[in-house]
Image (cartoon, grey):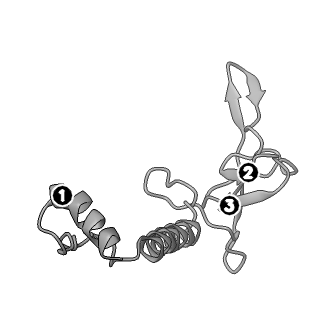
Amino acid sequence: MATKSRAKAAAGAGKGKAGRRSPVRVKRGAGVPLLPIVVGSILVVLAIVMIGFIVYLQRPAAGPQKVAGIPCDQLQHSQVHYHTALQIIYHGVTTNLTDDIGIQTDSTGANVSCYYWLHVHAQNKNVIHI
């Protein structure tokens, strides 16, 4: 048995000091688990995107534009509502007012979205609603 141990000692003699182990190297970053950090970061980014999307969807829709500082209302102000007839004669020819002046409709043209203070309905030619 002594010959085997001497043979091992002779083989290991060229590697350095006999009987010593090489120093343990500390692995850098191996103590920090990478997967939970990546998953957590992805969840945080998704949460921020979802909150931003919800805030974007909750913003108020742009209302109708003002014309000369006059807002467009969704009601016709039926508490005080006047009708005034207007006749325009141009070069001896009676000219009718254009239908739906002062009335905004949706993109289909079927539903009224708002009325300005002065407007003309298509059913009442040359009658201005105030």
| Residue 3: % across, % down | 31, 69
At horizontal 76% and vertical 23% (from top left) the residue drawn is: 93
Q: Disc 3 and disc 1: Cα gap in Å?
A: 93 Å
Mark 3 = which residue? 114
| Residue 81: % across, % down | 69, 71
Q: Nearer the viewer, residue 42 or 83?
A: 42
| Residue 1: % across, % down | 36, 77
- In the image, taking residue 9 as reference, residue 120 lies left or right, namely right
- Residue type, label 1: Lys
Q: Nearer the viewer, residue 20 or 50?
A: 20
- As drawn, the label of residue 65 is none
Q: Secondary structure at mark 1?
A: helix
Q: Secondary structure at mark 2?
A: loop
Q: Disc 1 and disc 2: Cα gap in Å?
A: 104 Å
Mark 1 = which residue? 15
Q: Of circles 3 and 2, which is in front?
A: 3
- As drawn, the label of residue 120 is 2
Asked which quadrant contains residue 17, the reply is bottom left
Task: Give the mark, 3 or 1, whose residue is nearer the N terminus.
Answer: 1
- Residue type, label 2: Val
At horizontal 59% and vertical 67% (from top left) the residue drawn is: 57
- In the image, taking residue 13 as reference, residue 5 lies left or right, namely right
Mark 1–mark 2 contact, CB under 8 Å? no
Task: Give the mark, 3 or 2, whose residue is nearer the N terminus.
Answer: 3
Label 2 environment density (alpha carbons within 10 Å; few <14, some 14–19, many ≥20)? many
At horizontal 88% and vertical 50% (from top left) the residue drawn is: 123
Label 1 environment density (alpha carbons within 10 Å; few <14, some 14–19, many ≥20)? few
